[in-house]
């Protein structure tokens, strides 16, 4: 969501904001920097920056540098945080190669809510903190779990979830 209205950003807008944020950590940001990184035209970047400026997330001097508002920095930081968490999950925990994980991360990062991210970060933290568990996971993945897509052999989704009282079976 953004400062001007409560509409969520599109994945494309998030990508632009992410890279403005990343480049701004090292100094000035120009339209040409973003165009080169994302492989898009200068007019495309200018339009996106203009839209994000109208949303109160960026500032832009005509033919000049791009800046971030306080709200833009907050949102940009959150996008980068999702990216880093998902990269750590896919590369360090699930054992994917960075080149293989990168497109997956960029698809998933737009779907993770502010409610899910802290929980995912806790999971990632605990997984990387337990080398024995992590090694067992990597062994399991390397032993063939990677190719299972149609049906899980691990019983995921088979555990019944009951809300309310626990039902006890009794033999008569």
Image (tube, rainbow, N blue to C red):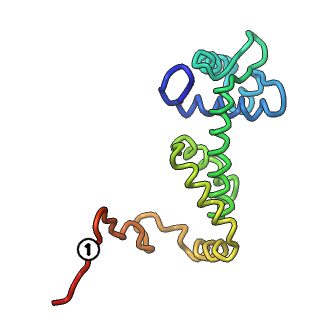
Q: Quadrant of residue 36?
A: top right
Q: Is residue 96 above or below residue 104?
A: below
Residue drawn at x 40%, y 68% as measured from the top left? 151
In this rendering, position of residue 152 left or right of residue 25: left
Question: Which residue is at the far bottom?
Answer: 172
Front residue of 35/10: it is 10
In the image as oriented, which residue stretches furthest toward the right? 27
Closer to the camera, 28 or 161? 161
Judge whether 11 appears above or below 6 on screen.
below
Q: Is residue 150 left or right of residue 82?
A: left
Name the residue located 67 percent from the left edge and 75 percent from the top edge. Answer: 135
For disc 1, the neighbor class at 10 Å (few under 14, some 14 to 19, many from 20) is few
Label 1 secondary element? loop
Please state which of residues 158 and 12 is positioned toward the viewer in this rendering. Answer: 158
| Residue 15 lies in quadrant | top right
x, y percent for residue 17: 65, 30
Apparent side of residue 153 relative to residue 83 in the rendered image (left or right): left
Up-down relation of residue 11 to residue 166 (above or below): above
Q: Which residue is mark 1?
A: 167
Quadrant (top left, top right, bottom left, bottom right) of the C terminus: bottom left
Horizontal side, residue 115 vs residue 91: left or right: left
- Residue 75 spot, x, y in % from top left: 62, 33
Residue 164 image point, x, y percent: 29, 63
């Amino acid at each position: 969501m953004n400062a001007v209205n409560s509409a969520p950003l599109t994945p494309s807008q998030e990508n632009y904001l992410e890279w403005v944020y990343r480049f701004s950590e090292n100094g000035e940001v120009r339209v040409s920097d973003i165009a080169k990184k994302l492989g898009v035209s200068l007019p495309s970047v200018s339009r996106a920056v203009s839209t994000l400026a109208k949303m109160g997330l960026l500032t832009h001097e005509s033919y000049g540098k791009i800046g971030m508002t306080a709200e833009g920095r907050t949102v940009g930081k959150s996008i980068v945080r999702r990216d880093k968490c998902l990269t750590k999950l896919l590369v360090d925990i699930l054992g994917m190669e960075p080149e293989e994980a990168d497109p997956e991360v960029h698809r998933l990062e737009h779907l993770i809510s502010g409610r899910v991210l802290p929980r995912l970060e806790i999971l990632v933290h605990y997984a990387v903190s337990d080398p024995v568990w992590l090694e067992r996971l990597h062994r399991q993945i390397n032993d063939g779990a990677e190719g299972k897509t149609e049906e899980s052999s691990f019983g995921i989704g088979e555990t019944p979830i009951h809300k309310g009282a626990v039902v006890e079976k009794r033999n008569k």
